[in-house]
Each structure stands twice: as structure tokens, then as C-alpha cells.
């Protein structure tokens, strides 16, 4: 059935069948044009009313916008046509007639708010600039996977239905699992750690994570795509090296393979893959620099978490991707290892885009006793995590890794105003369908 | 930290640090060997007791099996060593001591039942033949993604938290979503269809699906990996072509890139990528051939679903991957289109491995009125699916696609006896952790 010619491939001198959506109809009187759109572009179909069959003209010009049609005809050069060619139809078949009233205008001439767009994603994605986001998202995932394989990491898939959360119960969605209480997993953290102790040693996973966070902001999702990496025999500095490599690979993949999409988004001139090493600031340097900006009402002191305005001030100051290292242990999760020579100092790190946090990582605590103590200090029952901790008794190497927010990567790369623009069908407190 | 040399890369004449797990210690009296294992293989570490520091000998030979150690020393040729080289240690560091009692023997000398293996996946995956399954699984996903991209399909991710199931409520896991009832998605079916009506036109997704099926069998999982494909302007025969291409690509990728892994599984001689076209049998031919085998107690008649024994009998008869086409409409889901010239006959198809069903697909119903009727005939309220059906009013092209069970693909490819062997952490009625 799909023996059609893509509009972008229609060459003068050929007889083709093109099929797609009716983008626009321009009736100039004796002559009229139907602009047909498919995934590769648009093509002009010419109707010379006096010289063509009346039925054909009536069908072609009477069809509603966004209907699906198939047109067979000769392709000719026409410098005045948008793509330099046009089709003179011999026949036109209305494959799927669209309602005359559309909930959203795919030509983009009428603006729609984000909520209307998300309610009508199918129509929304007929716009070049929206389609471009998801083509770029796919390229990001492709190039990230390739970068992981170049690092000798094996792709894994870990369960999304779990008996216990990674960091306790506050942000978990409960499931009824054959009469038992279970949860949707908020992170593959514990599972990927179990894999570095196996013969795989170095692993990555790209998959959904679920967080029952109450806040509805332009940067949070309740279902997101997490890009996770973990390696045996890595320390936090090597994990940061790997992180830099993978993030750069995503940018480079897009720069190399998505020029048309960047153009559709108007980013062809400003898009740049980051070069050079990402600066590595200690937490201490970070709060000093934030304080020095004078942007905060109150000065930060050691032990404070970085407020959003602080991240913004520092991001503007640094002006490129950067790491924050050596955090106070007390504000990093218990499974992150402290520095051997200073228990107050964590090997945890964040990797930041100038506008927001993208990555959280660190070297992990691999010593069984310390790990069990950590659960207790966090107020969690180590017994409940026995399936995880017990493997640390059978030869668990030192290891490090990180998790990268897939949507945040796309959002910051393209300068999107809302993280929901980087997800086909976002989930938030209010939005459960489509 | 990971400045170690992989065991497979240790060359005679070098001084190296190798690190990994203590696979075995063989004490022959005056001389003893520690076999060290890492992700690339094994290497022999030689202890000549009289010529070496007592502490070094004591530490090296006193360490428990499966402990993590780092050994620095000179590599020398030694034809009698398993890999032709051995290391004479200058120092040995016990990085993570293992308990002397292991719940499972990673050397494979003591058999463990599947349940014990799954409870201790970290240890289980230290076995070459188990590790090989997951290296192959990763290659299957890599080559499948590449095949999809060669078909110009865009990778998408659709939500796993949904307001309504694809085919109604019987096999859904309920979630509490901010006080609302929601479900874990059992298939990306409806979402991928919404995308063929968008500018993307052709899409694929590889992600988790969740089915609250009660039956516990060696071929069912409650959380599985679905490989989904959907294309605008395809009919069912083109969808079958794409299916064949993708499944062959998976086999070819493994044949090309996983020879060591196939050897670890003892499959190096018998593994073959399927060649030629997969035979396409109609449902009518299928039941005739099953009846002719005489394997069933009762003869199948038109309208019967194929029982498992029937699939086995037919699979043995056909002896290779094959399609079953032209099913009775009444036993295929409502969203599958019937043949235009015979409403009793569905365009749905299954793709079968000789031992079990791998793929289910078909051309989809793209006509709004027919689709809404279908929901009603299935006993579903079309209103609840309005987010999906309404998009069919705005120019939905004809389209077709399919879903392939990722674990079943790996299971049948490698002849595994239980689908759980193809999942790191399987989920079934009884198993919710690890």
C-alpha cells in the first residue's frame, strides 16, 4: 500500500502518487492550489479549473484541511512553487476526511496553549517545530546509547514494579499487585548497583521512572525518562568523565544528524555542542560564588541545599555545563560514599546546565556494614532491603554512577520553556490522559 | 580508579594491576594458584610459597572465593595456564571480602534452581553462560533499534501510567494516582496509533508493559518488554514485511557480534539467522494442518482460537518462523481492521516461532465510526477512550503495526526453558523482589 512517493522525493518528469495531509487550499479563481504535507515535507498540487475534470476539481478543492488524500499525477518544475515542483493531478482520492472544525490548527497560524496542544498531540505533532523536538529526542537517545556502548557498558532493563522504593515511601505511587502492596519504581538505583557486582560490571538503562512529587512546575514530571549509568571499579571522578562524554555525545549526535530539525526550531545558528571539560566546582566554591552574586536574600552557609534561585545565579555566572562536587554528606542520599579522609564530605556530585540540574551521581557505598547503617540512619528498615544489601556480602566492588533526566537534557538542549514539551504524553498531577 | 588492566588484555612482559573476583584457589603445596575473574575473562595468579613474602601468600590464599581483589604483578607466558599467561603478584589488595558461605556457586559446579538464581542474580550473573544471555539481549535491542531506524521509524516513549487500558480492565494493575484511579499500561497500542496520525507517520517503542495475568507459566511475565512498531500508509502485508526484517536483524546482529556469548551457551554450531521469507499461512490452512497432525484430541473448527498444543504441533510441522494471517474477525481485537471484501475475516496476523507466538499485529481500523462501534461491541465505553478516538476525526491515515515480545524473542532465539531466564529481575505472581 505504501507505494507512494514521499513529497521530498518527487522529481520533475515523473508520474507519482503522493499521499498525506491537506495542509492548505489556495483558490485564486481560475487556478487553485492544494498543498499536500507528509513526513518529509510539502508539495503543491495544481488545479487549472477549466482544463480539468469537474469532479476532480470539486473533490480536490472541497476537501477539508487536514484530511488525508492520495494524489496521482505528473511532477513538473515550477519555480514559483514552495519546493520548486508541483503535481498536476490525474486523480485524487480522499482517504480520510477530516472534520471541518479542528481543536488545534496544525498550520501554526493560530496559537494554542500547551494544555490544548497536549490534549491534541496528534494534531500538534503535525507542526514541523513540534515534530522536530521528537526527532531530536530520538537522536539524543540513539547517540547516548552509542556513547554508552563505546564505554563498554551493557544495556539492561530493570523492573518498574517493586516491593520497596529506593529512598523510602514518600514519593511512591502504590500499586495493587495480586493483593500485595507494591510500588512503581522511582529509580533503577538499587538494581543497577546489583549489576555492577555481577559479571556485567558496567551497565546503563534508559527507562521510565515514576515520582509522586506533589509540585507541578515547568521542570518536573511525575513520569520521566531516566538515563542511568553505573560502573564497577569507577570512582566519582571517572563517573563524571563518563557523564561528560555521554552528554557531549548527545549534543554531537544532534548537531550532526538533526540540522533540518534545528532549523525548524530556529536554532540552526545558536546550537553548539559543548566543548572542553565541564568545570568542576566544589560545593564550597559553589555557595561562595552564589553568595558573591548577591542574588539571594540570605547568604548560603555550609550544609544548605542549593535553592533554585541559587542554581540560576550560579548557572548564569558559570555560563556552561558544570559539576558541583564534594557536597556535605548530610544532604546526599545514604547510598553515596563519603570521602575516605573526611566523613562529612560526600563523593556525590551534580551536573548542571546553566538553567537547572541534569544529573545526580557519586561513588556508592559498597561496604555492607556502612550500607546497613545508612539505611537505619535514613529511617528505613534494612530488613526490607535485604534483597539488595545481602549481595554486598558476596564481593561487591567499589563503584560509581549517575542518573540523567532525559527530558531535562532535551529541554535544556533546545531551550524549551516547559519540560512537558519534551514528552509526547506528559503525566502530572492534573494530566492522566491522553 | 579503574586504571586496572582487563584480564583479557594482560600481555606477557607487562607489569599490570588486574582486579576482579576470586574465582578459585588451587593449593598444590609448594605452589598455589588464584584464578581471578573479571568481565573479560580469567587470569591465573601464581604463588610460589617459598619465594614470596609470607603475608602476601597468606592474604592471597586465605581470601574467600568471590571476594574482590586487586593484584599487581608481572605477566609471563605460561602454556599450562588456562589463558596461556599468569601473573606473579608483587602485591594483592583485598578490596571486598566475601562471606565464606555463598547462597549460590558462581563457578557453576553446584547447580541451583531458578528461584535461588533469581533471588541471587548478582551471583548468578557471574556465570559466563548467564552473562551471555544478557549480553545477547542487549545486542538484540541494539540491532532491533537499528533495523527500525533503517525503516525510517522514529523512536518514541509513551506513558506507562494511563487512565484506561487498551483492551479493558481485566488484566490491569490499578495504581493510586494522586487520589485518582489509574492503571499501568498493558500496551502502547493506542498511543503508537495516535502517532501515525501525527507528522511522525512511522514509529517504534521498546518499553515495559504490565499485565495482571493470573497464570504462572514458563512463557508468561507480568512485566515484560514490548517491541512495538506502527506505520501510516502500511497495510498488514507491509507490516509483516517490516516484522520479518526486524526479527532477522536481531538474529543477524547476534550472529555477527556475539560469537563468544553463543559459545558460552554452547550454541556456536547450531545458531542460525533465519533465511528466506517466513511462510505465510492463513488461519484456515493453519487449523487444517493442525488437524492433519492428529496431535489434538478434538478437531479444530473455524472460529476456534489456537490452543497451545495446536501451536506446538503446527510449529513442529512448519519448522521455522511463520505467519498466521486472515483470522476470524471475532477472535481478534476490535481495533484490527477487517478485510474490505469480507467482514468476517480480519487483517490481523500472528508471527510464530515453532515453539510459541512472538508477534501480534494487523492493519488497524482507522475509520472513526467503525472504531467507536468496535468499542461498544467489545463492551467498552467509547467515551472513556475519547482522547484516542477523537483524533480519528481529524485525518487518520490507514495504518498497520505489531507488538513483539522482547523476552520471547530472546528465549526462542537461545532455546531457554523459561522466559524468566531472559529477564534480570522477573515479575510474576509470586515474585516481587529483588
Image: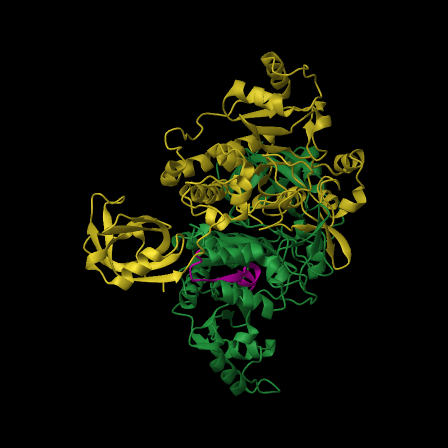
Chain colours: A green, B yellow
Residue at the image position 50 percent from the left and 65 percent from the top: A369
Residue A172 lies left or right of residue A236; in this view the side is: right
Q: Position of residue B176 (x, y in %)?
A: 74, 55
Inspect this view and state whether residue B276 appears. Answer: yes
Residue A406 colored magenta? Answer: yes
Residue at the image position 33 percent from the left and 63 percent from the top: B93
- Decide which of A76, A125 is in the foreground and name it: A125
Q: How many marks?
A: 0
In this view, B94 is above or below B194? below
In this view, B57 is above or below A313? above
In this view, B163 is above or below A89? below
Single out the residue that lies furthest toward the front. B29
Which region is colored magenta?
A395-411
Specify the quadrant that holds the N terminus of chain B.
bottom left
Q: Position of residue B253 (x, y in %)?
A: 42, 39
- Decide which of B23, A208 is in the foreground and name it: B23
Residue A419 colored magenta? Answer: no
- Decide which of A255, B357 is in the foreground and name it: B357
Residue A217 lies left or right of residue B356; in this view the side is: right
Q: Position of residue A19 (x, y in %)?
A: 60, 39
Amino acid at each position: 500500500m505504501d507505494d507512494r512517493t514521499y513529497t521530498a522525493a518527487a522529481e520533475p518528469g515523473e508520474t507519482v502518487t503522493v499521499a498525506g495531509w491537506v495542509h492548505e487550499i489556495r483558490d485564486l479563481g481560475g487556478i487553485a492550489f492544494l498543498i499536500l504535507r507528509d513526513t518529509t515535507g510539502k508539495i503543491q498540487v495544481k488545479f487549472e479549473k477549466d482544463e480539468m475534470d469537474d469532479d476532480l476539481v470539486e473533490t480536490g478543492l472541497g476537501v477539508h484541511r487536514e484530511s488525508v488524500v492520495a494524489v496521482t499525477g505528473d511532477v513538473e518544475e515550477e519555480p514559483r512553487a514552495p519546493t520548486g515542483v508541483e503535481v498536476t493531478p490525474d486523480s485524487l482520492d480522499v482517504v480520510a476526511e477530516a472534520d471541518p472544525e479542528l481543536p488545534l490548527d496544525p498550520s501554526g497560524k493560530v496559537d494554542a496553549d500547551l494544555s490544548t496542544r497536549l490534549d491534541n498531540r496528534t494534531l500538534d505533532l503535525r507542526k514541523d517545530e513540534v515534530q522536530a523536538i521528537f526527532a531530536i529526542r530520538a537522536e539524543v537517545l540513539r547517540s547516548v546509547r552509542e556513547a554508552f556502548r563505546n564505554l563498554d557498558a551493557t544495556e539492561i532493563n530493570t523492573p518498574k514494579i517493586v516491593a520497596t522504593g529506593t529512598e523510602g515511601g514518600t514519593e511512591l505511587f502504590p500499586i495493587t499487585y495480586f493483593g500485595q502492596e507494591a510500588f512503581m519504581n522511582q529509580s533503577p538505583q538499587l538494581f543497577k548497583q546489583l549489576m555492577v557486582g555481577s559479571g556485567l560490571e558496567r551497565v546503563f538503562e534508559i527507562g521510565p521512572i515514576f515520582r509522586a512529587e506533589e509540585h507541578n512546575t515547568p521542570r518536573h514530571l511525575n513520569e520521566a525518562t531516566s538515563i542511568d549509568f553505573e560502573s564497577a571499579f569507577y570512582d566519582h571522578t571517572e563517573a563524571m568523565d563518563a557523564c561528560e562524554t555521554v552528554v557531549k555525545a548527545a549534543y554531537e549526535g544532534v548537531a550532526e544528524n538533526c540540522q533540518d530539525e534545528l532549523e525548524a526550531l530556529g536554532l540552526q545558528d545558536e546550537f553548539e555542542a559543548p566543548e572542553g571539560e565541564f568545570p568542576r566546582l566544589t560545593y564550597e566554591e559553589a555557595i561562595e560564588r552564589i553568595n558573591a552574586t548577591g542574588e539571594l536574600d540570605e547568604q548560603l552557609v555550609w550544609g544548605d541545599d542549593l535553592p533554585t534561585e541559587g542554581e540560576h545565579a550560579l548557572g548564569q555566572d558559570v555560563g556552561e555545563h558544570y559539576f558541583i562536587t564534594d557536597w556535605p554528606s548530610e544532604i546526599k542520599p545514604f547510598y553515596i560514599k563519603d570521602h575516605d579522609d573526611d566523613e562529612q564530605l560526600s563523593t556525590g556530585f551534580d551536573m548542571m546546565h546553566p538553567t537547572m540540574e541534569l544529573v545526580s551521581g557519586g561513588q556508592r557505598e559498597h561496604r555492607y556494614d556502612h550500607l546497613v547503617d545508612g539505611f537505619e540512619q535514613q529511617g528505613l528498615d534494612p530488613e526490607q532491603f535485604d534483597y539488595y544489601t545481602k549481595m554486598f556480602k558476596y564481593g561487591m566492588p567499589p563503584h560509581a554512577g549517575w542518573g540523567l533526566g532525559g527530558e531535562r537534557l532535551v529541554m535544556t538542549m533546545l531551550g524549551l520553556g516547559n519540560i512537558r514539551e519534551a514528552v509526547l504524553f506528559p503525566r502530572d498531577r492534573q494530566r492522566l490522559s491522553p
